[in-house]
Image (cartoon, coloured by chain):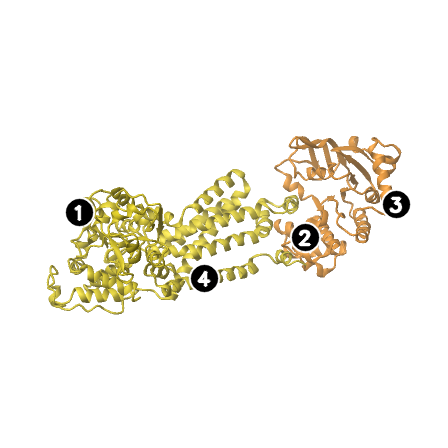
Amino acid sequence: MRARGLWEGDNSVIQLDQVSKSYAGRCVLQPTSLQVMPGQTVSLVGQSGSGKSTVLRIVLGLIRLDGGSVALNGAPLTPGNARRLRHGAGYVIQDGGLFPHLTAADNVVLLARHLGWDAGRRTARVRELAEMVRLPEDALGRYPQQLSGGQRQRVGLMRALMLDPPVLLLDEPLGALDPLTRAELQRELRALFSQLRKTVLLVTHDLGEAAYFGGNIGVMHAGRLLQLGTLCELREAPADPYVPALIAAQQQAALTGTAA
Amino acid sequence: MIRCRSVLSGVVLAGILLGVGGRVPAADGQVTVGSKAFEESWILGEALTTLARDAGAAARHTSNLGGTDVVYAALKRGDVDLYPEYTGTIAEAILKTSGRADLAHLRAAVAKEGLGISDPLGFNNSYALGVTQETAARYSLRRISDLARHPDLRLALTHELLQRKDGWPGVSAHYGLRMRNVQGIQHALAYTAVRTGQADVIDIYTTDAQIERLKLVLLEDDRHFFPPYDAVLLYRLDLPQRQPAAWAAMQRLLGRIDEPAMIRANAQVTLDHRTQEQAAADLLREVLAPAAPAGGAKGQTSRKPEFVPQTALPGASPSLLGHTLKHLQLVGLSLLAAALLGIPLGVLASRSRGIAAVVLSITGVLQTIPSLALLAFLIPILGIYDPPAYVALFLYSLLPIVRNTFTGLTTLPPHLAEAAEALGLAPAAQLWRVRLPLASPAILAGLKTSAVINVGTATLAGLIGAGGLGDPIWRGLQTNDHALILQGAAPAACLALLVQLAFDLLDRCLVPRGLRLRADGD
């Protein structure tokens, strides 16, 4: 659990090396490097537009890079192997990103079915996952529209975990939930991360949430990764004036009860 | 790869379907009589068919074949063996010779096309301009040249007359007319227009039964513009050898039908609303009566001194159910073929902007071609009957299907499109499992649009011998017979509603349940 992973060994699970991206001349990500070690949880925090979601998309090869390189689970990511490498990284987005035309169970098994898993194996895995994320059995046969927000998020997590990938990428996974459900899912996610020993890269705008999941926090602003470290390190040795400003703003929000 | 294969199989299937739907052109052992889309032509066609059939030939009447272009193209291709035509029309509309070529000249000219012209049937059915008695009195109109004094009179003329060199352009140049209100109109509707005072001057065929009924005044062609329009038979030169008996029997009509006889026969259909078969039978009975010695029929007359037409003519006039089924077949098969090609084309277009631009503009341009014009393009290639009807309907169905498929696929919620990609699904799996199901409501809406439009457009098939509900509609329009129009229009309207209903059911089967939940709201 050392801080800056840049100089650590190359057994990293996620490795970004000087990746950058601009759209139509507007830079959304300055050259950025980041390493996440096996079993580590890294949370990227920043305002919307800071480039944090772009980082996740780059890890999955969903975005064509302007420069730099990506390695996932030890393999350099290329257009040719991106699809295969994605099988080793579960991706969860806000509100689950479920396909509305498929039931919860069908959403979960979509990829496994495509990869030729037989029905018995699929069913067993779905049952196991439902238990793991505490989704009631009857919810499996429902369509996304018929599920609660928390249930949709659980199904999204099940879909990401279906192939038991070493890596989990979560983009504001709890952003669309009411505070109670959100707190409950935060607790469960934290337990799940340590229980499953997944390598987790998580994006959130809530510093408190990032701190709750533990591990390192990356502060992003205007397309730059300003600092990567524990909350303690961010507090005591901020690398940029933006870092204490962000901490102060979130504390104020928490105290006055206006947190999102 | 899968994409290529499905496009290809779509094309092949469309071809098979069209091939199945198409009718075989006139077989060798058969006489096919054609006729144009007005009652006189139907009656003559029917009479000729009856004569050929009674002479022992397998004869068929393909009636109501649009205008001169359609039926002439059908004759040249051999889809029909002969049809009643007028010398003036042959000279101007077909051979494009100006002036008044005599029969010998016309025969020499059409012989190059493998066609022949019979001797005249006996009557002259020329163009004339007509006005009501009131109009004639109010503006003191007697002759065509009188029109020059009243340039504001409203003229409602048939499209064919407006277009032909020997028609309105020729008349107005010849007489130096500068009429300001000239409108194109369907011929049968022109009578209604002049009767209700919505038009002052209309063009008339001089054997029209309506002249007598509406007491129309025919303006004298005082500067002799209109050539004679002697009725003749235009036939393929191989017909007399192929079917000598039938040809001899049909020739019995030559020189036998005078103007009053033709007007009476026309009146039976347009005024008394009798069928073309009944009118033809009466005409035959009248003109081939034993009183008149029959000529040139090689002893046929001695065996059959009095003409007794057979009553039940097989397949002469399909039932309402037959028309409706044919209509459904036209709409259904063309739609199926369009779906099999259109959906893959829409998918292809959604993959690349370049393909999208090409595919969408081609299908868009096709949509702007007026349906009759499209048929006119297709007939020289495909002949008459079913093939051009299917192809035209197929082409008109493409745009809504292609465009809706394209739009449905390119306007998917971006986060869902990304989720499918982020899962690591192969492109084909993304298409089948995610994109197409999500776009299915839009694709079905496109199919529905095409189907409903096709129910309407398919009525045009009635003008090229392909049948369907257009057949009674066009005949009704021609004879101003509202009951007959309704016989086609009412089932067509029901069919449109039925198609809507069928697609609502199809929606339930094909659109995934999860998507319908969203439409209902939760």
Query: Both on one chain, marks 2 and 3?
Result: yes
Q: CA distance from mark 4 to mark 2?
A: 47 Å
Q: Chain of mark 4?
A: B
* Mark identifier at residue A255: 3
B475 on left or right of A164: left
The hue in which chain B appears in the rendered picture of the protein: yellow
* Mark 4: secondary structure: helix
- B218 lies left or right of B441: left
Q: Please report, as a chain letter, where disc 2 is located.
A: A
Instruction: For mark 1, give the secondary structure.
Output: helix
Cα gap from disc 2 to disc 3, whole angstroms: 39 Å
Which residue is identified by label 1?
Answer: B107
Q: Looking at the picture, which amino acid does disc 4 mark?
A: Ala
Q: Who's orange, chain-wise?
A: A
The residue that disc 4 covers is B493
What is the x, y in percent for residue B190?
A: 33, 55
Q: Could you tell me the amino acid type at mark 1?
A: Arg
Q: CA distance from mark 4 to mark 3?
A: 69 Å
